[in-house]
Amino acid sequence: MSRLSRRAVLGAALGGVAAAGLSGRAQAGTTALAVSSWRQRWAPSAAVDGLAAFETVEDDRADSHVPGRPHIFADGGTYRWNMHMVDRDTKTDRQRQEVTGMRTPAGGAYLEWLPGQTWRTTYSMYIPSSLKATTTWTDVMQLKQPGTGTLPIVVQGLRRVDGVQTIELTLPIAGIHVGHADLDPLHDRWVDVDFQVKVGDGTSGRLRWVLRSGGSTVIDVTRTGVDTFLADRVRPKWGIYRSLNDTSGSLQDCYLRTTDMRGYQLVSGTSGVYQAEEARISQGVVDSDHLGYSGTGFVNLDNLVGSYAEWTVEAGAAAGAVLDLRYANGTTANRPMDITVNGALVADGRAFNPTGNWDTWATASLPVTLKAGSNTIRATSATAEGGPNLDRINLH
C-alpha cells in the first residue's frame, strides 16, 4: 500500500473513534470544557535581545572587580555568567552575579507572577566542573519577592552533602527539601531544566522540578501544599550566588551558561495542548531525531511492557472531553497502549497502528471524563515492543 493510501485508511479509521469521542462528550453533560494549557509568554534571543530580556541585571553591584566587567553577557546564542574569586557582593562574605525577571518584548514591560497563577520556565544549563557544589550554599536559580531583605522562596542550588556534590531544589523559608540529584554526572554537559510553580500563599502553592540530560530524565519531582508567595509578586532569578564560607575548598573562578530560555503561563481555554516532553516519563527519553514533531521533541518509550508517559491536566470543571494523542509508529505492527485517567483504565490495549515511517504522525482519539482540578492521563506500553513515539496530547 502506498504511503498516501495508508494514511487515508488510517485517518478514516481514527475518524470513527473521534466521532465516538464526540458522542461520549455529549453524553457526559452540557458543562463547557475548560482545560488549561501552557501559553508561551517569553522567548528571548541572547544574540538579539541581550540583557534587555531581563527585568534587572546585578553585575558586580559592589564595584569589586571593575576590570572583570561585564561578568554577565550574551555569548553568541547563550547567556554567560562569570564568577572570579576576587568578586564580592555588597555583603562581603558572598558573591553575586544574577539577572532577574522577564521582559517582553526585550526592554519592555516585565511579566508579573501573581498569587493563583501558574508559571513555567524551561532552559538548557551548562555547569562546568569549575562550578562546584559547596558545603554552604551556591544558588543557580531562585524564586524571590522583589526588593531586599527577604529570603528566596525557592532555590535551585549546588550543595555538597557528606562529600557528594548534588544539585537540589529547596524552599529555604519553610525548610523543605523538594529533591536532589548527583551533580558530578551533569558537569560539563548541557542539562535541560523545567521548573513549574503555582504561586500560592500558605499551603496553596505547588512545584514541579524536572532535569533531563541526554534526553533521559535525571529527576522529576512534584511538591504540593507549599507556600510559594511572600508579598506583592514573585520573579525568577538566574546566575551564580554563593557563600564564601565553604569548607571543602571548592571555590574557584567559574562560569554558568544558559540557552533556549522560555517562559510560559498556564491559561484556561476550550482545549488544552500538552507536549510529550512535558510529561512524566518512566523508561523512555525525549528525542528529536525524526521530522514533523511539535514542541521541542517527542517521547521515545523503551521497548518493554510498562514504559509510560503521564501528563497532569488542569480542568476548570468536571466534563467529558475528547483526548487526542499524536503519535508516530514507523514499524509494520500495531503498538497498543493502555490509557488511564486518574488511575482508571479508559482504553485497554488501544491500537496505535503503523503510520508508514517515524517522520509521519497520526492522531488517535478517545472519549474521557475529567474531574475539576488536576487530572493525570497516562499512556502505558502494553507489549514488549513498547509504545509508539508520542508527540503531544490535546483535550477538547
Image (tube, rainbow, N blue to C red):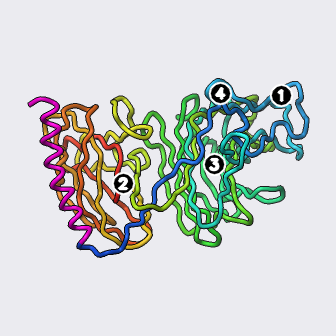
Which is the main secondary structure of the residues drawn in magenta? helix
Closer mark to the observer between disc 4 and disc 3: 4
Between the residue at mark 2 and the residue at mark 1, the CA separation in whole angstroms equals: 45 Å
The magenta region covers 1-26
* Element on which disc 2 rests: strand
Front position among marks 3 and 2: 2
Q: CA distance from mark 3 to mark 2?
A: 24 Å
Q: Are marks 1 and 4 in contact (CB under 8 Å)?
A: no
Where residue 47 is drawn, which disc sits there?
A: 4
Per the model, the C-alpha gap separating discs 1 and 3 is 25 Å
Could you say where residue 379 lies in the image, as x and y percent from the top left?
Answer: 29, 53
Viewer-nearest residue: 191 or 93: 191
Q: Which mark is residue 156?
A: 3
Amino acid carrying label 4: it is Ala
Left or right: 188 with respect to 69? left
- Answer whether residue 2 is magenta in the image: yes
Q: Residue 179 lies in magenta, yes or no? A: no
Q: Which residue is mark 2?
A: 310
